[in-house]
Amino acid sequence: MTESTLQNESNSAVSSPAEAGEATAGRRRLAALYDQYRDNAFTTPLEVVGFWSAVALPFLYMPLLLTGISSQAELLTFLGLLVLNLAALLAGHDHRRD
C-alpha cells in the first residue's frame, strides 16, 4: 500500500473535526460507563460466577462430545451449553485482573 492510500484511508475514517469530536465524546462516555460498571456492587459477584461458570461448563459438554451428538436434542443441548459458556466468559473475563 502506498503512503497516499494510507493517508486517504485514515482521512476517510473521520472526515471532519466535528466527527472527530463526536468520536472522542463517545469514547469518554464509554469510559464513564465502564467506570460506573466497575464501581457497581453487583459487578464482583457477577464476575466471580461468570469466571467459574466458564471454567466448569466445558465439563458438562465433554460427555456429549465423547459419546457423539446423535439427536437434535443433544445438538441443541450442546449449542446451548456453548452459548452459556460464551456468556460466562464475557461476564467473568475481568475477574481478578487488578
Image: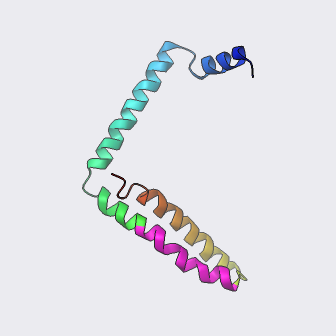
Q: Is residue 83 visible?
A: yes
Most foreground residue, 37 or 73: 37
Q: Is residue 59 magenta?
A: yes
> Residue drawn 44% across and 19% down?
21
Q: Is residue 73 visible?
A: no
* Left-right relation of 87 to 63: left
* Left-right relation of 64 to 1: left
Q: What's drawn in magenta, residue-wise?
A: 52-67
Tell me where residue 15 appears, x and y as whole percent.
Answer: 58, 16
Most foreground residue, 16 or 90: 90
Q: Is residue 81 above or below residue 27?
A: below
Q: Is residue 83 above or below residue 34?
A: below
Residue 12 lies in quadrant? top right
> Residue drawn 47% across and 57% down?
90
Most foreground residue, 13 or 6: 6
Tell me the colour scheme of the image. rainbow
> Residue drawn 30% across and 59% down?
44
Tell me where residue 23 appears, x and y as whole percent.
Answer: 47, 25
Quadrant housing the N terminus? top right
Q: Is residue 18 magenta?
A: no
Residue 50 lies in quadrant? bottom left
